[in-house]
Amino acid sequence: MALARRLLRLRPHLATLPLPPPSPPRLLQSRTYISDMRRSALVDRLLRSVRSEISFLDNSAPPPSPPAPAPFAVEDCPGEQWARLRRVFPAAEGEEEEVRVDATLVDGALPPSRSGADTGGQPRLHISVKVEVSKAARPGVALNFECSAWPDEMEVQRVFPVRRGGPSPLRQYVGRQFSELDEEMQSAVRDYLEQRGVNDELAAFLHAYMENKEHSELIRWLKNVELHVKK
């Protein structure tokens, strides 16, 4: 009886004692650990793959590209899929022209034979080229040439004037395809571009240059992927 009365007196105090926190389930902890391990393993695998590819590319660089044909100067665009060349051409009566050449990375290919037959050789790689010739005396107008640069040939596709520094027509008429023009005019356009250094030699240079740019851009891209994954 005495013990029962003591327990009754202690009951209000016992009700206020804090309860110990429940232990986390061991199964949940185990699953979280396994998930973290898997995530870490996937990241490590990706990093190994990226670093292996960077190492391979570092050891298999293409030959250095030759210097740009004089007097062109190259303006590379790191991280972009194109590059620009510029030169000043002394035109008639002391007037100067600016010749600007914008070229993409390789963006297509054809069979090695012009007939399309499979001869087992390397495909003919294609680079899109836009040439713009402008005059200081007429800053609002330029002459555009859309071209295809093959490894051994600069091929003109279209010729048309454009406005500079103002609104362009929504659907500008750009004339006929170059191959549909009179042969005499075709010959005159080729001579015009040849005089300004836009020729087969420039096409060969662009292919060598873009091969190196493609290589360096791929390494840059892989390093950016590596940097993001490491964070």
Image: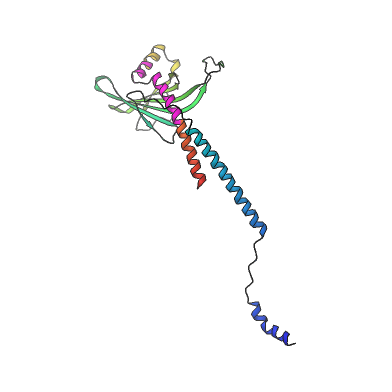
Could you say where residue 229 lies in the image, as x and y percent from the top left?
A: 52, 45
Residue drawn at the location 55% of the way across and 39% of the way down:
49
Quadrant including the N terminus: bottom right
Count the numbered circles shown.
0
**Which range is magenta?**
190-213
Q: Nearer the viewer, residue 8 or 222?
A: 222
Lateral position of residue 11 relative to residue 185, left or right: right
Most frequent secondary structure within the magenta stretch: helix
Q: Nearer the viewer, residue 25 or 48?
A: 48
Could you say where residue 59 lies in the image, as x and y percent from the top left?
A: 48, 32
Could you say where residue 128 lies in the image, as x and y percent from the top left?
A: 45, 25
Residue farthest along the right direction in this orientation: 1
Res. 171 visible in picture:
no
Q: Nearer the viewer, residue 98 or 73?
A: 73
Residue farthest along the front direction in this orientation: 59
Q: Residue 164: which quarter of the image?
A: top left
Q: Is residue 99 highlighted in magenta?
A: no
Q: Residue 143: which quarter of the image?
A: top left
Could you say where residue 54 lies in the image, as x and y percent from the top left?
A: 50, 36
Q: Is 167 drawn above or below residue 90 in the view shown?
A: below
Q: Is 80 drawn above or below residue 97 in the view shown?
A: below
Q: Is residue 193 highlighted in magenta?
A: yes
Residue drawn at the location 49% of the way across and 33% of the way down:
57
Lateral position of residue 100 relative to residue 23, left or right: left
